[in-house]
Amino acid sequence: MTETSIGQRLREVRGTLTQAEFAERMGVAKITITRYEGDASVPDGNFLLKLENLFQVDPAWMLLGRALSNDSHINSEEAALLTDYKSISPSNKEIVRAMISVIANLEKEKGGR
């Protein structure tokens, strides 16, 4: 398994948002996101807390590439899905939730996860 950098993990969290859009949501300048993603600087505590509040990203995962406890970990695929989900309209969110519910029920009927 290849270890990722803080910058790579932050790009995963940003998902389809542009650096400018992500910076605006995070309340920082675009150049700050560029520096973080380029591993030229490391996010401070306030940034990590805001990232956790807005995107449900474990600060330990962001800094270390792993969660300190399994309960609070969100992997990069889940983070990207969540970021994309947050960027869509409320009506499309409703459609996504309905689709997930149908798929989850089918999995339960089949004895899947």
Image (cartoon, helix red, strand yellow):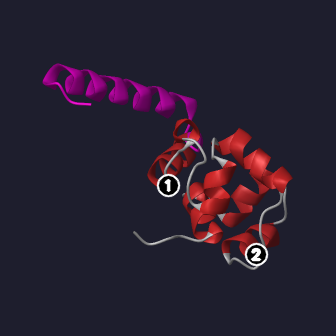
Q: Which percent across, then down, holds residue 27?
A: 84, 53
Q: Quadrant of residue 11?
A: bottom right
Disc 2 is placed on an element classified as: helix
**Is 20 left or right of 107, judged from the image as shown?**
right
Does the magenta run of residues contain 11?
Answer: no
Q: Residue furthest front?
A: 68
> Is 69 placed above or below 30 here?
above
Instruction: Please give the residue where the numbered disc 2 appears in the rendered image.
Output: 35
Q: Which residues are magenta?
A: 86-113
In the image: residue 85, left or right of residue 52 = left
* Label disc, if present, on residue 76 of the rendered structure: 1
Instruction: State whether residue 15 is above or below residue 83.
Output: below
Please state, as top left, top right, bottom left or bottom right, where the N terminus lies in the image: bottom left
Residue 33, x across and y down, in percent: 74, 67
Quarter placement of the C terminus? top left
Mark 1: few, some, or many residues within 10 Å (few <14, many ≥20)? many
